[in-house]
Image (cartoon, rainbow, N blue to C red):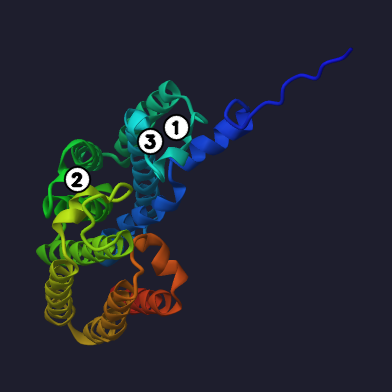
Amino acid sequence: MTTTAPRRTAASAPAGRLRGLVRTCRPRQWVKNLLVLAAPAAAGVLGRPSAVLDVVLAFVAFCLAASGTYLVNDARDAVADRVHPRKRTRPVAAGVVPVGLAYALGVAFLMLGVALSLLTGGWELAAVIAAYVALTTAYSLWLKHLAIVDLVSVAAGFVLRAVAGAAAVHVEVSSWFLTVATLGSLFVVAGKREAELRNAGLRNPELGGSRLTLRFYTREFLGYVRATTSGALLVAYCLWAFELHEGMSKVAFGLSIVPFAVGILRYAMLVDGGSGEAPEEIVFDDRMLLVSGLLVVACLAVGVYAF
């Protein structure tokens, strides 16, 4: 009588574990780190190979730091995630990736991200990445449970990405840049929360799989946040385009206002329609948003590098 060896499950197979690690690293979220390009591009330094290399290092360092925080957070929340209707399928919670391995790799990624940032020739980028790690850790442990504070915290993560680009190439961050980056981040995060609230159910006290802070929000309040931040954002962007530039450069920057405004209005329309939970996906899935973004980039590139 012969017996067959038990089949290896996905949880124990090396290939399944590797896929689980990749999923836990959230590579789809890395698109957010493209914000490191913003400040160097606006400063006009991307024509220098050394600056391009520093920006690439900043992007990779931020991807490592972000994935490190995801690994550590999933390892710490594994027990709670196993009883969660949606999060229980996460690789660490499902047992595909061992908790100890997630912790070890997460810490290694965090350290590697900071170490890699030092290759840019200064401590500034390392300080920004350290601030990002501290912010995301505080958010996971505490800040995400505080209404309004959670909006500001997530928006601050976007702003730190934008500041990281300036730190990598050692250029000064202007007050206008920070204003536009902050208002734009709050606008996007408010839309994200509004989409989550709509899709989770209106003020359901048993939100379960959704964020606990959603019970404190209303669509009217989040709509108000979007309206005020989008209005201020458009004004700030227009003033930046017209007041800080001269000659043909001013024309190119001024023309960018049109696709910029179209992109803001289109995103607001998508949020009202129920989209917006994953802003990093909407930008590439919606043709109007993608075209608007490309036109803005084209106008700014002409204004910065052609004149």
Rate crowding at label 3 as few (under 14), some (14 to 19) or many (20 or more) other CA atoms within 10 Å.
few
Furthest residue in direction right, as rendered: 1
Look at the numbered discs 1 and 2 and tell me whether their residues touch, using CB distance below 8 Å: no
First in sequence, mark 1 or 2: give its number. 1
Q: Are marks 1 and 3 in contact (CB under 8 Å)?
A: no
Q: Nearer the viewer, residue 185 or 242?
A: 185
Q: Position of residue 148 (x, y in %)?
A: 12, 55
CA separation, marks 1 and 3?
13 Å
Residue kind at label 2, given as amino acid type = Lys
Residue found at x 43% / y 74%? 286
For residue 80, side relative to residue 239 (left or right): right
**Numbered disc 1: secondary structure:** helix
Q: What residue would you read off at disc 3?
A: 83
Foreground residue among 28 and 121? 28
Q: What residue sits right under mark 1 in the picture?
A: 92
CB atoms of marks 2 and 3 within 8 Å: no
| Image x and y of residue 213, in percent | 18, 51
- Determine the CA span between mark 1 and mark 2: 21 Å
Relative vertical location of residue 218 with respect to residue 265 in this rendering, above or below: above
User: Mark 1: which amino acid?
Assistant: Val
Query: What residue would you read off at disc 2?
Result: 144
Q: Position of residue 95 (x, y in %)?
A: 49, 28
Rendered view: 28 above or below 123: below
Q: Secondary structure at mark 3?
A: loop
Please state, as top left, top right, bottom left or bottom right, where the C terminus lies in the image: bottom left
First in sequence: mark 1 vs mark 3: 3
